[in-house]
């Protein structure tokens, strides 16, 4: 069909403009990886260690009870939100491993020794807001859930899993070591400096329980090996050498507040330990998280202060 040259020029110009507009706009942007929900919110089974009851509960509701138990509910929402992301990650990783399933036939339990702390009676608006703000968010490394470790106060410097927990089951390259977060500036005085005295008879029993060997009369004690952050990885108690993290658990982790020791000696029939910090110092420091939140850091920024090469993914709406 014949067309006037002017008509053909106008048609060509119109097509060119349409194509140019399409190229300028480009393909529709894809959502960021942590904004792509992978499924529906899970319902988990929970064993109540006090009553022996089993119940089903939505995961986000469960996480509220964990955050309320693990962190001061009056703290900044962003600190509580960082705790929520780690609590959610811890829950998912442990359910996948099936640790509590072997004990009680449920996904989780209310025992801090078996799973993590849980106290729904402490839930307040701060906690609800923190959990809702991070709904569905978990931390992964290489596509798998991380070990979402945290401690109360790392004494101003964080540790690797090998140093702080004697954890060598698998590599944990996502845990940052040597993070200096300034937590001692705001933490409780008892975390800045503490001393504990333990009868040598209890220490001897603890060493025997930990190593399977009798250290004999405990008349001397010293640090046999320190890790990169300065924590006692191994201690010489009497005639035996024992792992610091293991001995701390055997003597009581509330009593021996950390392995960031400044002094160890035997005096008057007691083992005397002096140190700072509270907890193993691996992963997120809760007091550090509070300080970072007060400085305006987001929950995600707080977590990335203590973990590296990770992804924070939203797995359900």
Image (spheres, rainbow, N blue to C red):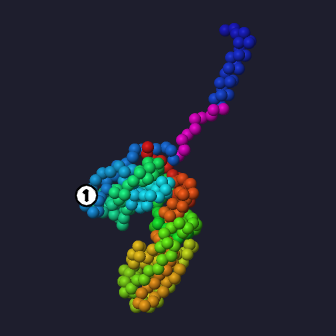
Residue 26's quadrant in the figure? top right
Location of residue 40 in the rendering, given as x and y in whole percent from the top left corner: 40, 44
Q: What quarter of the picture does the N terminus occupy?
A: top right
Q: Main secondary structure of the magenta part?
A: loop
The vertical placement of 96 against 22, above or below, is below
Q: What quarter of the picture does the C terminus occupy?
A: top left
Depth check, front residue: 122 or 59:
122
Residue 107's quadrant in the figure? bottom left
Residue for point 39% across, 53% down = 124
Single out the residue that lies furthest toward the right: 5
Magenta span includes 29 = yes
Residue for point 49% across, 80% down = 274
What range is drawn magenta here? 24-33
- Give the residue pinned by disc 1: 53
The vertical placement of 42 against 279, above or below, is above
Magenta span includes 129 = no
Residue for point 68% across, 24% down = 17
* Residue 211 seen: yes
Location of residue 86 in the rendering, given as x and y in whole percent from the top left corner: 46, 57
Location of residue 283 in the rendering, given as x and y in whole percent from the top left corner: 50, 63
* Residue 92 seen: no
């Amino acid at each position: 069909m014949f067309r006037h040259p002017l008509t053909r020029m106008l048609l060509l110009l119109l097509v060119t403009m349409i194509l140019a507009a399409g190229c300028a706009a480009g393909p529709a942007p894809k959502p960021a990886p942590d904004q792509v929900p992978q499924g529906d919110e899970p319902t988990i089974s929970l064993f109540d260690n006090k009553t022996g009851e089993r119940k089903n509960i939505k995961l986000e509701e469960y996480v509220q009870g964990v955050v309320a138990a693990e962190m001061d509910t009056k703290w900044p929402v962003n600190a509580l939100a960082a705790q929520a992301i780690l609590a959610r990650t811890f829950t998912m990783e442990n359910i996948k491993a099936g640790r509590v399933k072997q004990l009680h036939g449920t996904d989780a339990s209310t025992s801090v020794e078996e799973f993590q702390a849980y106290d729904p009676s402490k839930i307040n608006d701060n906690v609800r807001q923190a959990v809702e703000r991070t709904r569905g968010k978990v931390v992964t490394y290489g596509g798998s859930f991380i070990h979402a470790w945290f401690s109360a106060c790392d004494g101003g410097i964080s540790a690797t899993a090998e140093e702080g927990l004697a954890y060598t089951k698998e590599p944990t390259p996502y845990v940052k070591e040597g993070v200096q977060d300034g937590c001692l500036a705001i933490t409780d005085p008892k975390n800045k400096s503490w001393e504990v005295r333990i009868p040598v008879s209890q220490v001897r029993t603890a060493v025997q329980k930990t190593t399977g060997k009798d250290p004999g009369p405990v008349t001397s004690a010293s640090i046999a090996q320190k890790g990169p952050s300065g924590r006692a990885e191994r201690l010489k108690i009497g005639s035996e050498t024992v792992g610091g993290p293991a001995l701390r658990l055997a003597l009581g982790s509330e009593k021996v507040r950390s392995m960031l020791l400044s002094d160890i000696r035997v005096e008057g029939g007691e083992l005397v330990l002096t140190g700072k910090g509270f907890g193993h110092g691996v992963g997120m420091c809760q007091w550090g998280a509070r300080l970072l939140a007060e400085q305006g850091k987001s929950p995600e920024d707080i977590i990335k202060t203590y973990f590296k090469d990770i992804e924070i993914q939203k797995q359900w709406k």
